[in-house]
Amino acid sequence: MTPIRASATLLSLIVLAGICACGKDDVRTSCDEPQPYQAAVAGKRIVVPDDLAPLDETKEMAVPKAETPPRPPGVKCIEYPPSANTGN
């Protein structure tokens, strides 16, 4: 393979990788819309067969309900973390 052909192949792969990285993700424009995790429901407890040792109930973690105050109207939500270049 000639150096020009190798360079063209490498450049094509880089461009293709860049195009693939720019996929159409589900970008939300408002944090007032219901989020997918809000539809989660608690599952059933695990049923342990009689011939196995029971689960240790002291190792379970109870997840508390989050209580956050409502956001003031007109305030935008943060969808991406702030850049590391703050103040420069």
Image (cartoon, rainbow, N blue to C red):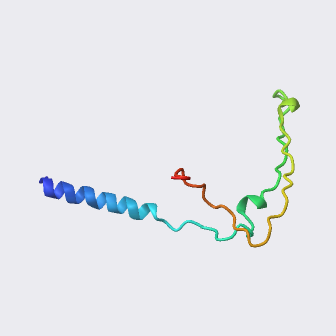
Q: Position of residue 24 (x, y in %)?
A: 52, 68
Q: Nearer the viewer, residue 44 or 15?
A: 15
Along the line of sight, which residue is nearer the eye, 18 or 53?
Answer: 18
Query: Which residue occupies the foreground of this view, 6 or 86?
Result: 86
Which residue appears at 46% of the width and 64% of the height? Answer: 22
Q: Place residue 27 in its image quadrant.
A: bottom right
Q: Is residue 12 above or below residue 42?
A: below
Q: Horizontally, is 49 left or right of 24 in the view?
A: right
The x and y percentages for residue 59 are: 83, 31
Q: Residue furthest front?
A: 87
Say whether residue 86 is left or right of residue 69: left
**Figure disc tally:** 0
Q: Position of residue 32 (x, y in %)?
A: 75, 69
User: Which residue is located at x 84 percent, y 52 percent?
Assistant: 66
Residue 40 or residue 77, whichever sits in front: 77
| Residue at (35% x, 62% y) in the render | 16
Q: Position of residue 37 (x, y in %)?
A: 73, 58
Judged left or right of residue 7, residue 55 is right
